């Protein structure tokens, strides 16, 4: 496959992925996973946020056998968003550093907040917080 076709395929695969940038697939984000699939180096079953429907859509595009997503990589969950419990935030900035989409703002030793429309619900900020002041809530429909 030519480089241009591989790039086009990676682009199309990336558009099917949920853009959580969570890394549960084993790659540094959705685009690197899409590129690996386009090169034939990764299967369609690596994305828990996409669930079985996502794995089937990827398989259709690649014209390969549909697979259920690999449950060992994590559980498929409804869309969620992080929320900082303001009264408990100590302003350590660890959540900001962990966020792959820059959805958390705040300054050192000041309270932080999540910009909800930017948050992908990847959960990477939760273990980074030393005071457990980040909660995940379902996205309102």
Image (cartoon, rainbow, N blue to C red):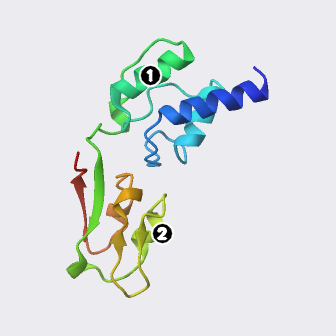
Badge 1 marks a residue whose secondary structure is: helix
Structural crowding at the residue carrying mark 1, measured as other residues with C-alpha within 10 Å and reported as few (<14), some (14–19) or many (≥20): some
Please tell me which residue is depicted at 28% across the width and 79% down the height of the picture: 89
Q: Which residue is mark 2?
A: 97
Q: Residue furthest bottom?
A: 109
Please tell me which residue is depicted at 34% across the width and 52% down the height of the picture: 121
83 and 76: which one is in front? 83
81 and 32: which one is in front? 81
Disc number lying in front (1 or 2): 1
| Location of residue 17 in the rendering, given as x and y in whole percent from the top left corner | 47, 36
Quadrant holding the N terminus: top right
Q: Looking at the rendered structure, which numbered label has been put on residue 76?
A: none
Structural crowding at the residue carrying mark 2, measured as other residues with C-alpha within 10 Å and reported as few (<14), some (14–19) or many (≥20): few
Residue 29 position (above or below residue 90): above
Q: Are marks 1 and 2 in contact (CB under 8 Å)?
A: no
Q: Is residue 60 visible?
A: yes
Q: Residue furthest front?
A: 141
Quadrant holding the C terminus: top left
Q: Looking at the rendered structure, which numbered label has been put on residue 57?
A: 1
Q: Quadrant of residue 132?
A: bottom left
Please tell me which residue is depicted at 36% across the width and 39% down the height of the picture: 49
| Location of residue 20 in the rendering, given as x and y in whole percent from the top left corner | 43, 47
Badge 2 marks a residue whose secondary structure is: helix
| Location of residue 14 in the rendering, given as x and y in whole percent from the top left corner | 55, 36
Left/right placement of residue 101 relative to residue 137 reads: right
Left/right placement of residue 84 relative to residue 36 reads: left
Left/right placement of residue 131 relative to residue 25 reads: left
| Location of residue 74 in the rendering, given as x and y in whole percent from the top left corner | 33, 39
What's the distance in space between the residues labelled 1 and 2, CA to CA? Answer: 32 Å
Residue 128 position (above or below residue 7): below
């Amino acid at each position: 496959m030519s480089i241009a076709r591989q790039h086009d395929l990676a682009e199309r695969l990336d558009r099917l992925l949920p853009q959580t940038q969570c890394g549960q697939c084993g790659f540094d984000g959705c685009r690197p996973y899409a590129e690996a699939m386009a090169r034939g180096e990764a299967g369609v079953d690596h994305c828990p946020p996409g669930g079985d429907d996502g794995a089937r859509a990827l398989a259709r595009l690649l014209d390969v056998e549909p697979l259920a997503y690999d449950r060992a990589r994590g559980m498929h969950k409804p869309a969620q968003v992080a929320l900082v419990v303001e009264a408990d935030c100590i302003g350590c900035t660890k959540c900001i550093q962990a966020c792959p989409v820059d959805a958390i703002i705040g300054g050192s030793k000041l309270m932080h907040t999540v910009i909800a429309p930017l948050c992908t619900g990847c959960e990477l900020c939760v273990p980074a917080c030393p005071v457990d002041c980040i909660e995940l809530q379902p996205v309102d429909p």
